[in-house]
Image (cartoon, rainbow, N blue to C red):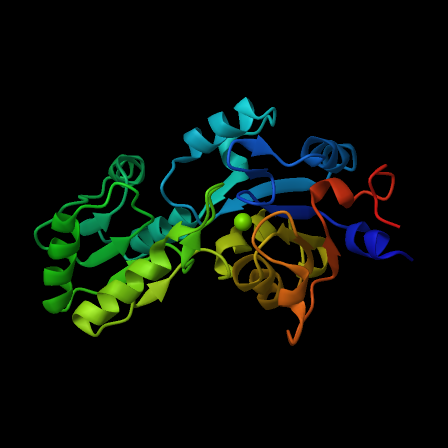
Amino acid sequence: MSEFDRCFTKKKVVFLDLDGTIYLGDNLIPGATGFLDYLKHKEIHFYFLSNNSSRSKAAYVQRLKKLGVVTSEEQIILSTDGVLAFLQQQKVKQVYVIGTESMLGMFKERGFEVDSPHPEYIVLGFDTELTYKKLETAALHMNRGVPLLATHPDLVCPTPSGPIPDVGAMLALFEKASGKKPQQIFGKPNPEMVQHILAKHAASPQEVVMIGDRIYTDMELAFRLGCDSILVLSGEARREDLEGLSQQPSLVVESLGHILPTSPSLPP
Ligand SMILES: [Mg+2]
């Protein structure tokens, strides 16, 4: 049995990273639509996972549509989802959110006060609209003992011009300024991010494949969940990054376009 057959036999659910896996900047990765068509044909459910909390689900659906990928908001799973679920479970309404207007909108829609003077939690997302005022307010709340939640651990976000500071880098700033670490970090590689989808489809980890371009988030999620994993080299990770890893991905390919065995560009 080939590695491909082993990865896709008796699978119910495939999770796909977006940045560096489905697209890079404004360009769709060649072969991405063909691969998604294959999943549809095989009736395998697929979901897009992103740790990028700067955009709403509707914005992701639009972005994918522009690139020729038709999807629905139900198929988009964001790192923000886990934070919202956690706060709702805790019956918290008063928070201080460091995030884009788009992210604040997701919280407001669910009835959160996002700029509460007496927050029960500070939530840190990927804020491409960050101001010093927000850093100051959050730091003062932290000094008063308000716990910090982070949407995801990524240190940088890939862009066509190179990596830019992401939530993980901001966490380092807060740790330097307050001496405190976040109470919890959501998003990949936390397997909780996808547990509700496995439950929805009654899928065991053996019936799941995770595909992504990052080792410490995408592959790590697969390792923790105990599912098959496919590393694409179209984004961040390079083949040499795999040297010395205690656990290896099930399959390593140049890009999504190189997964299907019938692909004309399949390497020998
Ligand atoms: Mg990625």
Toward the right, the furthest residue is 1
Kindly identify the residue that appears in the image at 43 percent across and 29 percent down.
58
Q: Nearer the viewer, residue 15 or 64?
A: 64
Above/below status of 44 relative to 41: below
Image quadrant in which the N terminus is located: bottom right
Q: Nearer the viewer, residue 91 or 178?
A: 178
Pinpoint residue 207: horizontal percent, then vertical percent.
72, 54
Pinpoint residue 24: horizontal percent, then vertical percent.
55, 39
Kindly identify the residue that appears in the image at 78 percent across and 54 percent down.
7
Kindly identify the residue that appears in the image at 66 percent across and 66 percent down.
240
Kindly identify the residue that appears in the image at 22 percent across and 70 percent down.
176
Q: Is residue 204 left or right of residue 125?
A: right
Residue 172 image-quadrant placement: bottom left
Residue 130 image-quadrant placement: top left
Using the rendered image of the protein, determine whether residue 204 is visible from the camera's viewpoint.
yes
Pinpoint residue 205: horizontal percent, then vertical percent.
66, 60
Q: Nearer the viewer, residue 220 or 28?
A: 28
Q: Is residue 141 left or right of residue 29?
A: left
Residue 3 image-quadrant placement: bottom right
Q: Nearer the viewer, residue 136 or 44?
A: 136
Pinpoint residue 128: horizontal percent, then vertical percent.
30, 42
Using the rendered image of the protein, determine whether residue 119 is visible from the camera's viewpoint.
no
How many marks the image carries: the answer is 0
